[in-house]
């Protein structure tokens, strides 16, 4: 029996909007806006061909009550005619405003506001046609004492057919607008501060995650600026086609940069390969929605952007929870931030479809959730920096501990040597010979160790330290003899692609192969070093610009014609080379050689790679 009573109460609540349907709305002064939804009747025109005269001749049975506080019909291209009556019970003329809270309605016509004058507005009509210069659709009207007037509205849009209407007195509308502008100013000001803050960190740290996050904030701000009607009012009041496509476009761009940000800051590249493939697929879908925004109908692009947001939100939550399970500390904050944004976006999307009633909360839910999410993400980025600093501090402490242990071992070794010397005086000669032999082996080992420290462990070539030492000596010798000296800077083209496609073992084999091919063409008095990564450098004695270019071309052609073979793979390699030769004078130094050869290498890369380019001061703007 109690269950039956509860069910009857629920049924009664569901029927209340219909049973309580009023015939007209009395305009009584109030601090809260009046909602005309309960007195609105609607007639759907699927073809959109009816005019006001045929609509006024419709029978009463054709009109259906809206029976809810907002007139929302989801995503439909039908034309909807809305009819309701307003009554002025006061003894004086009252001036009121009908505010349409959906700035993205394509077309809205209002009849009965001002005699036979028809109000025509919408975001697919020039902004200057509006009666009131406002980001939303503002319909002013006056009622004489005791007057009852019928208003008829025609609404048609490719987006959410949501009227979201409210009635306010002129004074109430002024106060409402002041509050809204204050809140919107605070909202966009907070977004601007977040954007500048993260861009500044990116400039300082060069961490791309801050760049993606800054672009995400910028695109999301742009999206909100469009959704709230500010863009049409202030940026492009006459560019109606651009205004329509800019909404799904900004949403897709924000999603794209959100994917890049999530991928980087959650360090998904270190996880299973499926993480990377899924993120790439989502980025491809974002690009597809961007293309749809320009080429496809507005409804298709809009629904596509909504679906993309939902799918990306699901995967973002999944990745965050998985990284949280793996012990990645910043994932906890990301889970909280994504939850806030997803719940807010869900409210916004559901209100657009008409599933839940549109209100001031649903209209601004996404703004509230996004602010919360942006603050949480900024804290998470800071936490990520703190973790990196903590890891660096631990590494330094471990280094200090190893150094202390080594000193203790050295002290023990010295004590032991002293005890042996004091306790075995009778065997001094034998121990002296043994010690000399040990010292000779130690000297040999030290020379071998010194030689190893000068060599690159992977390719066997000299390393950059040797280049720094030997280049000064070779430059000084060339100054004394007034003989030319040439510098080659060489870089394997697209080497990161080799590592990404085949793995680092194949990449190491390619580096060894390239080093061997280059070493075979070097003279005994030339210096070939591994400069770093996939870069190599060579210093050529007694070689002018022509000879250096000739050798560089031989190196490039030889490597191109001899691919690297590894197991059953054949990897094609190519080389970009920058060449600089000079007869040194007093002002010549090591930095000049390296800088000019590197500038020539940069030109070789810019020219399409697999090129040999000699340094030319005029081409580089060098004096």
Image: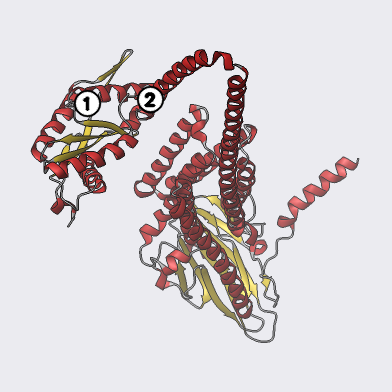
Number of the front mark, 1 or 2: 2
Label 1 CA crowd tier, 10 Å (few <14, some 14–19, many 20+): some
Where, quadrant-wise, is the C terminus in this rendering?
bottom left
Secondary structure, mark 1, is: helix
Secondary structure, mark 2, is: helix
Q: Does residue 202 appear to the left or right of 585 in the view shown?
A: right
Using the image, determine if residue 76 lies above or below residue 278: below
Viewer-proximal residue among 346 and 535: 535
Outermost residue toward the bottom?
Answer: 92
Residue 53 placement (x, y as % from top left): 47, 66
Using the image, determine if residue 400 lies above or below residue 63: above
Residue 467 in which image quadrant: top left
Provide the residue designation for mark 2. Answer: 447
Outermost residue toward the front?
Answer: 426
| Residue 276 in view | yes
Using the image, determine if residue 118 lies above or below residue 452: below
Residue 103 placement (x, y as % from top left): 50, 63
| Marking on residue 545 | none
Residue at point 50%, 12% (across, down): 430
The colour style of the image is secondary structure
Residue 158 placement (x, y as % from top left): 45, 53
| Residue 581 in view | no
Q: Alpha-carbon distance for marks 1 and 2?
A: 26 Å
Label 2 CA crowd tier, 10 Å (few <14, some 14–19, many 20+): few
Viewer-proximal residue among 578 and 58: 578
Residue at point 60%, 19% (across, down): 420
Residue 210 placement (x, y as % from top left): 48, 50
Residue at point 58%, 80% (across, down): 142
Q: Does residue 2 appear to the left or right of 324 in the view shown?
A: right
| Marking on residue 518 | 1
Viewer-proximal residue among 472 and 520: 472
Residue at point 20%, 25% (across, down): 559
């Amino acid at each position: 029996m109690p269950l039956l009573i509860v069910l009857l109460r629920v049924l009664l609540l569901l029927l209340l909007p219909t049973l309580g349907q009023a015939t007209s709305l009395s305009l009584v002064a109030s601090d809260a806006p009046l909602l005309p939804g309960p007195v609105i009747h609607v007639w759907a025109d699927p073809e959109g061909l009816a005019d006001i005269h045929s609509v006024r001749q419709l029978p009463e049975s054709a009109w259906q009550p809206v029976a809810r506080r907002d007139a929302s019909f989801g995503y439909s291209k039908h034309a909807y005619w809305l009819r309701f009556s307003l009554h002025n019970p006061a003894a004086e003329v009252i001036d009121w405003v009908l505010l349409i809270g959906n700035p993205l309605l394509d077309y809205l016509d209002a009849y009965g506001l001002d005699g036979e004058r028809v109000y025509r507005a919408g975001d697919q009509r020039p902004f200057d046609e509006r009666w009131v210069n406002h980001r939303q659709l503002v319909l002013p009207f006056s009622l004489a004492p005791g007057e009852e007037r019928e208003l008829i509205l025609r609404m048609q849009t490719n987006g959410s057919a949501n009227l979201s209407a409210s009635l306010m007195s002129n004074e109430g509308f002024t106060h409402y607008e002041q509050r809204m502008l204050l809140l919107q100013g605070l909202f966009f000001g907070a977004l601007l501060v977040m954007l500048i803050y993260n861009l500044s960190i990116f400039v300082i740290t060069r961490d791309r995650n801050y760049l993606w996050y800054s672009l995400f904030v910028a695109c999301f701000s742009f999206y909100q600026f469009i959704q709230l009607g500010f863009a049409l009012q202030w940026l492009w009041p006459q560019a109606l086609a651009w205004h329509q496509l800019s909404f799904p476009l900004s949403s897709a761009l924000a999603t794209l940069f959100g994917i890049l940000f999530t991928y980087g800051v959650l360090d998904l590249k270190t996880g299973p390969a499926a993480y990377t493939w899924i993120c790439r697929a989502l980025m491809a879908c974002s690009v597809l929605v961007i293309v749809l925004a320009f080429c496809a109908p507005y409804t298709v692009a809009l629904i596509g952007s909504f679906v993309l947001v939902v799918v990306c939100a699901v995967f973002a939550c999944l990745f965050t929870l998985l990284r949280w399970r793996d012990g990645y500390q910043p994932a906890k904050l990301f889970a909280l931030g994504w939850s806030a944004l997803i719940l807010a976006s869900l409210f916004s999307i559901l209100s657009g479809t008409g599933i839940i009633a549109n209100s001031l909360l649903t209209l601004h839910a996404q703004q509230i959730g996004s602010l919360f999410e942006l603050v949480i993400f900024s804290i998470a980025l800071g936490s990520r920096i703190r973790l990196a600093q903590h890891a660096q501090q631990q590494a330094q402490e471990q280094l200090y501990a190893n150094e202390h242990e080594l000193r203790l071992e050295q002290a023990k070794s010295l004590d032991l040597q002293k005890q042996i010397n004091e306790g075995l005086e009778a065997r001094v000669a034998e121990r002296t010979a043994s010690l000399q032999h040990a010292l000779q082996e130690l000297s040999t080992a030290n020379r071998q160790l010194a030689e190893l420290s000068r060599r690159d462990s992977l390719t066997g070539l000299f390393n950059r330290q040797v280049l720094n030492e030997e280049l000064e000596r070779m430059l000084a010798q060339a100054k004394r003899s007034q003989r030319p000296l040439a510098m080659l800077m060489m870089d394997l083209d697209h080497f990161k692609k080799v590592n990404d496609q085949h793995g680092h073992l194949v990449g190491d084999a390619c580096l060894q192969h390239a080093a061997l091919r280059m070493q075979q063409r070097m003279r005994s008095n030339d210096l070939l070093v591994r400069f770093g990564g996939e870069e190599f450098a060579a210093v050529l004695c007694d070689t002018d610009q022509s000879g250096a270019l000739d050798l560089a071309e031989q190196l490039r052609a030889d490597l191109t014609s001899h691919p690297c073979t590894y197991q059953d793979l054949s990897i094609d390699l190519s080389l970009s080379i920058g060449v600089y030769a000079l007869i040194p004078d007093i002002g010549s130094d090591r930095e000049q050689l390296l800088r000019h050869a590197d500038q020539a290498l940069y030109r070789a890369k810019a020219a399409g790679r697999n090129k040999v380019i000699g340094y030319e001061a005029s081409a580089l703007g060098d004096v």
